[in-house]
Image (cartoon, coloured by chain):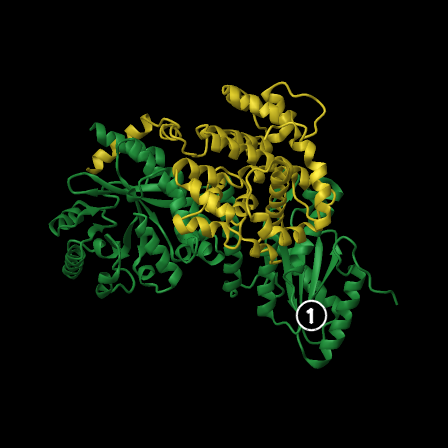
Chain colours: A yellow, B green
């Protein structure tokens, strides 16, 4: 092509700049590319005066998303007295940051076709997220973590498993082996049969969906318990260590209550997690009892 | 005499005890000719934090900062809290080089974001550094560090200044270190706020086919463009290159998928540095990005310099082997620059050879360059590689490369690097015309 033709190309390019042209071609087969709505929320978050009405209009266009967001704002977990009745109110109550993560969680779940295995997987993630958020606010926890971060992390920690289950039917077997493994690291079991693991996938997905650094770092290394013991905060920020430990305890409590998603991870990690959270073995019974109402109204 | 007092929020000595300690240390080392260093650390924008989160929030932040500083101190160093947001670190037997290194370590330790409710706060500090001079009193010594700290603050914060060096231009190393910290901060901001972009430059065959597009990273923060030549070395030094690399893998694989959905099975080339390949997780991240984009691995190509291919480290070689095993293509970038060696080519598992612009620029007039390019093309082809010429800017260069049987060319003569939307339009225009 000559230089003259280049000018034509750029004129053509200007006339055909269609926002989201390429973006819209993704996602039709369950590919979890970052939804345009998250970009929109981020753009508004960066403004001095975010346009909540505009966001509410965009979110309200999707009934499931709007309903999900209102339901999250009204959940006892947030403890707000007033009942939220609209997307706009939900955005005001939750704040854009929390709303953005809640939207990410809702869309993530929607992206995968509903199969029994995935449905149970997301139910477990939601249960672990709720207990994580509750634990973060528990006075006995010796580490300070934002409850919202703990909730988000619990929800997203294992999203790489959903991607692998969706993409590779044989991953069911790998997952069963990894869950039963008492000695090897969970990721090592995956890597015997796959060139990657769910932690790396989950971390990249979280990065591309704008989740904060502490969260996607915690997703990346959540099976590497030896790193949790190192105290150097430049190796691993305290918030990241805390997220991993809290979600691990939450998973253990969830398994205690439901008998679902049984794995050997608490067996491998309980010592370092309890040390980080500054709790003792004999306190666990109390956590089981106190946390029962959190899961009681959900049928697992 | 008042007893040593501890600041309850941080566990450090308080202001009074700091003055007492400085006086004692100056007396001790002043007499025996040993050195004594002081770093005066002031948290930037702390007033804003107090106003936003109240004094309780401010105390939590100070307590976090104190923990991070504590983890960095070594040996007989002592840290004191001398103000709401100010700390003094005194270290006997410490020279200026070590003090400077510690200053940088403190700045890095403070930087990781703190969580305050729903907010993430990224803190920075201004630090003044001084080494005790002969005959100096403890008050004069501390005052010099304080003055350097104030100067650092006046210059915009997020920097350290060594006493006496405030305006001395000969300390280029220090200036460079400060500028590097600034660039590192901007890169963090770019990663967190969407300031990075991949622009794509097409590579075309002589029949007009688009053979591939090369992703080139661009960084813009607050409207300011940071050139790759400036931010890549900083990313390599700080370890941020792994995050930048993961980001470009995500973007590049996604772009390849988008193009294939448009019916264009165009390979997307992604530049990969030694720092990325030296990370044991590189090949896992590569495969994860491919899975997430649901793209054919054969549409992804990694561009690496010749020296990276020849690096014998186990991690790098394992990453390269895994990349090939999963079906990703490898290309030798910018061949002919630096200390390239023809003999090495036979050992490199690449399928594409890209000739650097240094040779192409001299074409077609310079006969010696012409001979070298001819030899490189021949050798590349004999080894079964596709040979591409980079930096093609004129019709004459293009024609001489065609006569040398180069497979494809890249450069401003055909197309500049362009953003995703412009690339889409460019490709569709070509389809239509």
Q: Residue furthest left?
A: B403
> Who's the residue at 57% across and 40% down the image?
A153
- What chain does badge 1 belong to? B
> Who's the residue at 34% across and 55% down the image?
B320
Q: How many marks?
A: 1
Residue A282 to residue A206: above or below = below
Q: Residues within 10 Å of mark 1 (few under 14, many from 20)?
A: few
Residue bearing the label numbered 1? B76
Which picture quadrant has residue B298?
top left
Foreground pick, A299 / B336: A299
Task: Say what secondary structure mark 1 lies in.
Answer: loop
Foreground pick, B95 / A11: B95
> Who's the residue at 59% across and 28% down the image?
A49
Residue A24 to residue B276: above or below = above
The image position of residue B51, as x and y in percent, is 71, 40
> Quarter of the image containing the N terminus of chain A?
top left
In the displayed structure image, the side of residue A84 where residue B372 appears, left or right: left
Residue A97 to residue A189: above or below = above
Which picture quadrant has residue A111?
top left
């Amino acid at each position: 092509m000559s230089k003259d033709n280049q000018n034509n190309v750029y004129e053509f390019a200007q006339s055909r700049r269609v926002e989201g042209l390429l973006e819209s071609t993704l996602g039709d087969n369950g590919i979890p590319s970052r939804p345009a709505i998250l970009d929109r929320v981020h753009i508004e978050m960066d403004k001095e005066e975010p346009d909540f009405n505009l966001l509410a209009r965009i979110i309200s266009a999707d009934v499931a998303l709007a309903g999900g967001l209102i339901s999250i704002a009204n959940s006892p977990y947030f403890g707000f007295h007033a009942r939220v009745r609209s997307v706009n109110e939900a955005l005001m109550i939750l704040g854009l940051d929390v709303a953005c993560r809640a939207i990410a969680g809702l869309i993530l779940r929607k992206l995968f076709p509903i199969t029994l295995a995935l449905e149970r997987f997301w139910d477990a993630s939601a249960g672990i997220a709720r207990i994580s958020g509750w634990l973060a606010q528990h006075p006995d926890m010796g580490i300070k973590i934002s409850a919202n971060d703990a909730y988000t992390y619990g929800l997203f920690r294992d999203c790489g498993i959903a991607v692998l289950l969706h993409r590779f039917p044989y991953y069911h077997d790998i997952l069963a082996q990894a869950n039963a493994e008492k000695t090897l690291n969970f990721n090592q079991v995956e890597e015997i049969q796959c060139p990657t693991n769910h932690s790396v996938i989950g971390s990249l997905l979280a990065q591309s969906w704008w989740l904060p650094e502490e969260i996607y770092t915690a997703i990346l290394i959540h099976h590497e318990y030896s790193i949790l013991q190192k105290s150097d905060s430049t190796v691993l920020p305290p918030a990241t260590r805390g997220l991993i430990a809290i979600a691990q305890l939450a998973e253990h409590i969830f398994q205690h209550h439901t008998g679902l998603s049984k794995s050997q991870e608490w067996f491998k990690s309980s010592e370092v997690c309890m040390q980080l959270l500054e709790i003792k073995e004999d306190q666990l019974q109390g956590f089981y009892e106190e946390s029962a109402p959190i899961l009681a109204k959900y049928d697992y | 005499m008042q007893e040593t007092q501890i600041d309850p929020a941080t566990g450090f000595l308080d202001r009074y005890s700091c003055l007492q300690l400085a006086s004692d240390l100056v007396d001790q080392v002043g007499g025996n000719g040993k050195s004594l260093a002081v770093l005066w650390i002031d948290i930037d924008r702390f007033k804003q934090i107090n106003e936003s989160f109240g004094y309780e929030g401010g105390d939590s932040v100070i307590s976090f900062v104190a923990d991070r500083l504590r983890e960095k101190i070594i040996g007989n160093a002592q840290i004191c809290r001398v103000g709401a947001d100010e700390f003094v670190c005194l270290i006997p037997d410490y020279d200026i080089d070590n003090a400077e290194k510690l200053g940088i370590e403190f700045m890095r330790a403070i930087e990781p974001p703190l969580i305050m409710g729903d907010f993430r706060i990224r803190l920075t500090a201004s630090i003044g550094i001084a080494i005790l001079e002969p005959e100096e009193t403890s008050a004069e010594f501390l005052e010099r560090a304080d003055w350097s700290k104030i100067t650092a603050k006046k210059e915009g914060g997020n920097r350290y200044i060594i006493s006496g060096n405030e305006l001395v231009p000969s300390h280029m190393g220090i200036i460079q270190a400060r500028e590097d910290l600034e660039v590192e901060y901007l890169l963090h901001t770019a990663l967190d706020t969407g300031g990075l972009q991949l622009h794509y430059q097409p590579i075309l065959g002589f029949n007009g086919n688009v053979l591939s597009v090369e992703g080139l990273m661009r960084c813009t923060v607050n409207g300011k463009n940071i050139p790759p030549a400036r931010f890549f070395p900083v990313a390599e030094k700080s370890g941020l290159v792994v995050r930048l690399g993961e980001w470009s893998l995500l973007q590049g694989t996604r772009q390849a998928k988008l193009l294939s959905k448009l019916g264009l099975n165009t390979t997307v080339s992604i530049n990969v540095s030694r720092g990325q390949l030296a990370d044991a997780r590189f090949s896992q991240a590569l495969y994860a990005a491919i899975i997430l984009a649901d793209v054919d691995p054969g549409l992804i190509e990694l561009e690496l310099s010749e020296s990276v291919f020849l690096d014998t480290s186990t991690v790098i070689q394992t990453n390269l082997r895994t990349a090939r095993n999963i079906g990703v293509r490898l290309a030798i970038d910018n061949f002919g620059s630096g200390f390239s060696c023809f003999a090495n080519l036979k050992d490199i598992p690449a399928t594409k050879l890209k000739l650097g612009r240094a040779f192409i620029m001299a074409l077609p007039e310079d006969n010696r360059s012409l001979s070298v390019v001819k030899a490189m093309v021949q050798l590349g082809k004999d080894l079964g590689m596709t040979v591409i010429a980079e930096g093609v800017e004129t019709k004459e260069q293009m024609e001489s490369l065609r006569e040398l049987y180069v497979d494809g060319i890249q450069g401003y003569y055909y197309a500049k690097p362009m953003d995703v939307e412009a690339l889409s339009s460019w490709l569709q225009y070509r389809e239509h015309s």
